[in-house]
Amino acid sequence: MAISINPSYRAAAIGVASAALLVGAFSLGASRSSGPAAQAATLTSAQTPPGRITVTGVGTVTGVPNQLTLSMSVQVNASSVSSALSQANQAVRQVTAALRARGVAASDIQTSDLYISPNYQGNSQVPVSYGVSESLTATLNQMDRAGAQIGAAVRAGGNAVTVNNVSVNLTDTGTLLAAARARAVKDARAQAAQFASALGEQLGPVISVTPQQQPSPVFDGALSASSKAANVPISPGTQQVSVSITVVYAA
């Protein structure tokens, strides 16, 4: 049996179906757009980085040098290489013997840098003499005797000896470094506390400590050397040992 649909009913049915589809599409789109976006906004607002205060603390202590390094050279000229070398070797032996007699250990005396060179006169291509130079370094561990040891070495070598350099050292800086580190930490904490107070915050725990490169000890003193003096006057002065650290505090 054939079924017939009135045109007015057909239009009404199509309108209801279209309205239902539009409502469903709107609801699905709203749920898709609001869910992840709202969740992302919530996560972002919850992740607030903690405050930090970064400071650099410095600690400095002073110590008295307990070691002296003496650098000398022997220079001799003679008519032949063998004669110049023999005289230079003799001068080095005399200097070494004088140092040994004054209490310097053999292991603290080192010879180095042997140079032999011809000496010319005018435009002549024939050497008129030969020069020999030898270097000697002595480590003097008794500061109260260092002046007498240098004077004895200079007198033993005579006119062939030249004092090139005299330097003082701190051989054991462990105790000084420990004290300097403690002062650096105290300085860093004092600075951080001042910043936190000015900002109206509570100073939190230490997050990290980074030591900076340690500089060489700074010498503050006076040295003098004279081949005419019986005992060379030595004033060791002082040396400064500094420690620098970067500390990060929570706030």
Image (spheres, rainbow, N blue to C red):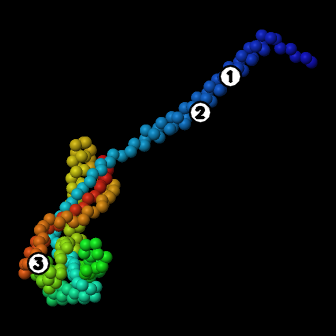
Where does residue 74 sit, x and y in percent of width and height? Answer: 21, 80
Q: Secondary structure at mark 1?
A: helix
Kindly indicate the quadrant of the structure image that contains residue 246. bottom left
The answer to whether residue 104 is above or below residue 120 is below
**Residue type for callout 3:** Ser
**Residue type for callout 1:** Ala
In whole angstroms, how far apart are the C-alphas of marks 3 and 1? 115 Å
Kindly indicate the quadrant of the structure image that contains residue 133. bottom left
Viewer-closest of 165 and 160 = 160
**Category of crowding for the residue at label 3, using alpha-carbon neighbours closer than 10 angstroms: few (below 14), some (14–19), many (at least 20):** some
Residue 63 visible here: yes
Position of residue 56 in the picture relative to residue 221 (left or right): right
Q: Which residue was labeled with disc 1?
A: 20
The answer to whether residue 82 is above or below residue 226 is below
Q: Which residue was labeled with disc 2?
A: 32
Viewer-closest of 10 and 181 = 181
Q: Which residue was labeled with disc 3?
A: 227
In whole angstroms, how far apart are the C-alphas of marks 3 and 2? 96 Å
Q: Secondary structure at mark 3?
A: loop
**Category of crowding for the residue at label 1, using alpha-carbon neighbours closer than 10 angstroms: few (below 14), some (14–19), many (at least 20):** few
